[in-house]
Image: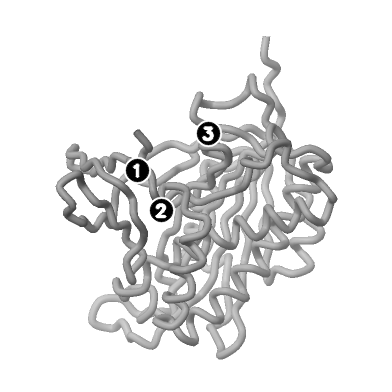
Amino acid sequence: MMIALKAATPQLPRTTAVADHVVAVDETDSTNALAVQMIGDGSLTLPDHQDGELAVAVVAADRQTAGRGRNGHKWVSQPGRCSTMSYAVRIPRAIATDESVNGWLQMIAGLVTLDALNGMIEEYGAAPNQPDCSLELKWPNDVFCHGLKLGGLLSELVIPPSSGTGTDADADDDVVIVFGVGLNLALGACRLPTPQSTSLQLHVSGLPSFGEIRDAVAERQVEGFRERLVKFIADPKGQAESLREEVKAVCWARGRQVEAHFTDGTTLTGEAIGLNEDASLILRTQDGTDHTVRTADVGVL
């Protein structure tokens, strides 16, 4: 019989030391939903973006009762085993709404997450159990290890109360992007939610306690979002080029035969050969035609 785990308020001393604002609760429906609500009612505020500076707020919970993924999917997590965090940042509206570059915001969140996990593993002297257990990104929003889903990301744009809307909106205004990051860190094999999922502790030996892992990873994510987004805001087009090369090295789908599932129920099968300049996926079908995939669930065949 599987024993139910009790939620407890996350203790995040390292994260609190680097973040501009931290909200930690034992349980909520969704950390993204809580962050969006608090931004809307003014209880979670972030200073305006300034050149070379970026504020980052964190909303954390030990248990989510209605965790969300992309396209209406559910994110199942367990207290004391899975990290459920949302990171809120203010960036210029012009960048957040520019379809030629805003796809890279999701990719940045993925890279920040890989950096944080790999940095934590190195800090504690832990090591992968097998050479092929490296962490990768499955376009557009999953963290993969050994071909299985270890985590997921969900980004949402929020208009803060101080910003205009509709005809009152100013392209120079800031908006808030909330990046939700769910990670299976300390799940045993018997607690995995699906056969396609996995957990960090199943692939890496020598890890510290779950609480230490969660805090160390979140601390690094705050610093990573701040560093990477400051650079991106300063030069979106230039950063897009360098990000494209960086993602190429950790893109799990690249070179594989995959099937893209679209929201209208249609599918497209082909080889994932890389990313376009706007961060969309290039899928080459059997007839040699390259197709651009911007919104879809992508699975390997």
Left or right side of 18 for 255: left
Residue linked to disc 2: 140
CA gap, disc 3 and disc 1: 19 Å
Residue linked to disc 3: 76
Q: Secondary structure at mark 2?
A: loop
Type of amino acid at the residue the image marks with label 2 = Pro
Q: Are marks 2 and 1 in contact (CB under 8 Å)?
A: yes
Point out the image quarter for the C terminus: top left
Which numbered dot is residue 144? none
Residue linked to disc 1: 298
- Determine the residue located farthest toward the bottom in the rendered image: 51
Q: Is residue 126 above or below residue 199?
A: below
The earlier-in-sequence mark between 2 and 3 is 3
Residue 194 position within the rendered picture, expressed as x and y whole percent measured from the top left: 50, 25
The earlier-in-sequence mark between 2 and 1 is 2
Near-viewer residue (76 or 184): 184
